[in-house]
Image (spheres, rainbow, N blue to C red):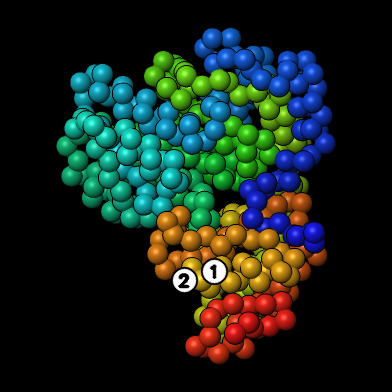
């Protein structure tokens, strides 16, 4: 089978196969076995878990952190726990979340509000602070919770953390940020979009995942002592799930050491993203196509680093599938993202980058894109959008 250049994974720092992580995981597996044996609250919480929670709290600048087995479970657990706390106190809760939030956040809000009138869920327009403020002003709930991705997984743009926290402060709402795609990649120390110096009151609930830039598996929630203690008592996906295998926690600790010791990985990643964007600026000129993210969209500063998620919006599903297939035949692996994952009419190629990519890899990707674009231009307008390595398949 022909090897493929992978531009579809979330292994942003190239740590998933790093020898240090492999060795740390193997060493812990030999000592502790391959499974934790039970839930955290029974006897599944082992030394590696405790050390990892402390290290994640330090990285994010939060008092404490709590491990979950997956990011999906973390988001469901947090939202349900906060809703349960409001209900048990006899208070109503209204949840406001960005329309383009990850499915786990949307599902968490939907599940928390099902079967009860005490919890309601509403969406605000993507990264639209004015729409959010209007909805917060109209709310009559006792408690309000605003939820947003940090880096949006299909578009690669970033939430305006300062703007969201200010809006929440004006209306007495809590803010929850899922920084799954920012952790390890953004921030001076790799702490993510929510800097470690961000006051706890500005972002009381911070979620991160370990299976992307950190190259392992699992997730965590970081916040105050009161938040973590509440989750331990109320978050059912934490209480009733077998704990993360200890060798995974050990491998993640090794990943955090590399993040701290090798900031050049983040610099290399940014260089490859910039190379791709500059190449696309030339390549796509006059084609009617453009990458979906511009520097101004990051809402941090004009000089802020770009994220490793770079979408090329192609419109209809057939076109996205044809381009994905044609790139694969040219040695490049990139996924076609279609509804319902993205809105109708916005099917796309979702390019993701790694610090392990070389300048030659990016050049090969741009060459393949140029060939696919040329083949499409040569295709009769009435023909099916199928592109072969040699040109157009009618």
What residue lies at 73% left-to-right and 51% top-to-bottom?
355
* Pointer 1 residue: 320
What residue lies at 62% left-to-right and 15% top-to-bottom?
37
- Whether 206 is drawn above or below 37: the answer is below
**Which image quarter is the C terminus in?**
bottom right
From the viewer's side, name the closer residue of 392 and 60: 392
User: What is the C-alpha distance between the residues marked 2 and 1?
Assistant: 7 Å
SS class of the residue under badge 1?
helix
Residue 288 seen in render: yes
- Whether 383 is drawn above or below 367: the answer is below
Which of the 4 image quadrants contains residue 214? top right
What residue lies at 26% left-to-right and 18% top-to-bottom?
88
Q: Is residue 374 left or right of residue 133?
A: right
* Pointer 2 residue: 316
Label placed on residue 116: none
The image shows a total of numbered marks equal to: 2
* Residue 59 image offset from top left, x and y in percent: 61, 31
SS class of the residue under badge 2?
loop
């Amino acid at each position: 089978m022909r090897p493929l250049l992978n531009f579809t994974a979330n292994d942003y720092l190239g740590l998933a196969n790093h020898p240090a992580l492999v060795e740390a995981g193997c060493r812990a597996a030999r000592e502790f076995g391959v499974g934790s044996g039970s839930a955290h609250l029974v006897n599944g919480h082992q030394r590696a878990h405790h050390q990892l929670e402390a290290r994640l709290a330090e990285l994010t600048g939060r008092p404490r952190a709590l491990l979950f087995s997956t990011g999906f479970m973390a988001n469901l657990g947090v939202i349900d726990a906060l809703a349960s706390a409001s209900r048990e106190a006899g208070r109503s809760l209204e949840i406001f979340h960005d329309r383009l939030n990850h499915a786990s956040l949307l599902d968490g809000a939907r599940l928390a509000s099902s079967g009860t009138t005490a919890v309601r869920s509403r969406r605000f327009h993507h990264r639209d602070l004015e729409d959010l403020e209007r909805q917060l002003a109209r709310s009559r709930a006792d408690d309000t919770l605003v939820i947003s991705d940090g880096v949006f997984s299909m578009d690669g743009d970033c939430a305006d953390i300062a703007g969201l926290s200010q809006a929440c402060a004006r209306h007495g709402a809590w803010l929850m940020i899922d920084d799954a795609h920012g952790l390890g990649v953004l921030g001076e120390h790799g702490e993510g979009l929510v800097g470690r110096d961000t006051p706890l009151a500005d972002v009381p609930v911070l979620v991160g995942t370990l299976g992307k830039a950190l190259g392992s598996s699992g997730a965590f929630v970081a916040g105050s002592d009161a938040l973590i203690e509440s989750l331990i008592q109320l978050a059912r996906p934490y209480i009733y799930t077998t704990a993360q295998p200890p060798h995974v926690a050990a491998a993640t600790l090794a990943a955090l050491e590399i993040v701290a010791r090798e900031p050049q990985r983040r610099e290399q990643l940014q260089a490859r993203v910039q190379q791709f964007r500059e190449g696309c600026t030339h390549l796509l000129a006059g084609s009617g196509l453009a990458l979906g993210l511009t520097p101004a969209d990051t809402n941090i500063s004009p000089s802020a680093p770009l994220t490793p998620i770079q979408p090329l919006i192609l419109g209809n599903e057939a076109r996205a599938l044809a381009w994905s297939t044609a790139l694969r035949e040219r040695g490049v692996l990139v996924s076609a993202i279609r509804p319902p994952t993205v809105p109708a009419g916005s099917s796309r190629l979702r390019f993701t980058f790694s610090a392990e990519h070389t300048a030659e890899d990016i050049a090969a990707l741009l060459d393949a894109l140029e060939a696919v674009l040329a083949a499409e231009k040569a295709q009769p307008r009435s023909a099916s959008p199928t592109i072969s390595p040699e040109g157009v398949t009618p």
